[in-house]
Amino acid sequence: MKVLIACGGTGGHINPGLAIAGIIAEHVPDAEFLFVGTPDGMEAELIPAAGYKMEYVEAAGFQRSLSPQNIIRNVKAVGLLAKAAGHARAVVRQFQPDIAIGTGGYASGAVIRAAQQLGIPTAVHEQNAFPGVTNKLLAKKAKAVMMTFDAAKQYFPAGTKTVLTGLPVRSSLTRRSREQAKRQLGFDGDMTVLSFGGSQGAKCLNDLMPELIKWHLDSDMNINHIHAYGKHGRDSFPQAMEQLGIAGDKRIRVTEYIRDMDVCLAAADLVISRAGASTLSELEAVGRASVLIPYPAAAENHQYYNAMVLGKAGAAIVIEQKDLTAEKLREVITELYRNPVKRIAMGQRAGAQFPADTNDRIWKVIAEITGMKG
């Protein structure tokens, strides 16, 4: 079985691609994989590091705001699009896959479209509650569209075969109890808050967290706090913590990037984060209450739609970035600290959203498309 997976740009597209490859390999150990992405995206590092072969297609996204700089970028994107189409067809012809799967990213559109034109069966995995333009176009000729959120179904063209599969998450997330994880981190206390904004960081969180952390350290609440400030907070955030005199407190763990997210999520009682699809699926998998601040510049504002899935289910408190203040976060943390019954109920509602058989659902779709036994 030969499988082509097109993905890239961000971890939100790459990790599902890698997870799907792992699911297929469990059922077909001798399956041959080829990933296709862009040479300057995160995929160029992450996919070879995972042991997979990689081909590169140069592609770029279109900028929606028409500043002089973005107009230049869009002209370049048009040129790359024409070149990518021919290159993608050559890659597909040479590899001759039994199935081509797109999980998003600039190269995904060109590659999956080329596969469809060459008669290769294709599938798409849509991570977000509001699908991107590329996946909506690819859906018309795809054999199946696998969805993380059922809310996405309404945005695909009539006649699209949509299947709610969920988003595969790392199996290590569900292997630890909260008590085990807290011991591993050296925490005691009544509540642990975990906040992060992705590998790049979220400025709106980094600006508020030092004062917020100092506030709850000075209060009568026994709270631990883990915060990842990301690449953009590398210089400013540790300095702010030092200036407030709270950098070395044993109840605080501050780092640029969380490499043991499975442990930190297990230890957390409340998560404050953006609303990327992978993050939400992990919150569902471990069943954690959350405060979600959607990234307002995300394509099609998809993070807002993602966040509202948990918000409407009573599993999360959604705060738009324009409304985010330290005072609002203090109110939320205080309420959920004083009312653990509400906090636990929110976590249970998050857990109820997670399809525990995601891997089986994804394999069933792929087996049906390729004519293998499910």
Image (cartoon, rainbow, N blue to C red):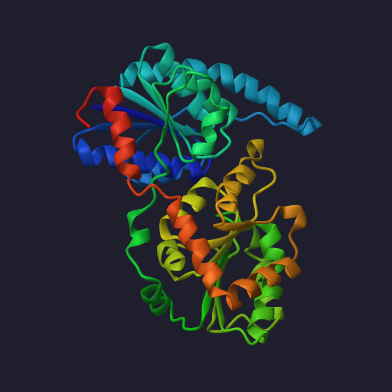
Q: How many marks?
A: 0
Figure quadrant of residue 94 = top left
Percent across and percent down for residue 96 are: 31, 19
Figure quadrant of residue 358 = top left
Figure quadrant of residue 102 = top left
**Relative to 292, does residue 308 appear above or below in the rendering?**
above
Q: Of residues 252 and 277, which is closer to you in this image?
A: 277
176 on left or right of 250 = left
**Relative to 217, does residue 156 appear above or below in the rendering?**
above
- Please name the residue shown 70% across and 71% down the image: 331
**Relative to 334, does residue 189 appear above or below in the rendering?**
below
Q: Of residues 107 and 166, which is closer to you in this image?
A: 166
Residue 257 visible, this orientation = no
Q: Of residues 280 and 77, which is closer to you in this image?
A: 280
224 on left or right of 293 = left
352 on left or right of 27 = right
Percent across and percent down for residue 47 are: 39, 42
Q: Quadrant of the C terminus?
A: top left
Q: Determine the residue located farthest toward the top in the rendered image.
A: 118
129 on left or right of 50 = right
Percent across and percent down for residue 137 are: 54, 21
Residue 371 visible, this orientation = yes
Percent across and percent down for residue 333 are: 63, 72
Q: Determine the residue located farthest toward the right in the rendered image.
A: 68
Q: Quadrant of the N terminus?
A: top left
- Please name the residue shown 48% across and 40% down the image: 13
Q: Of residues 280 and 255, which is closer to you in this image?
A: 280
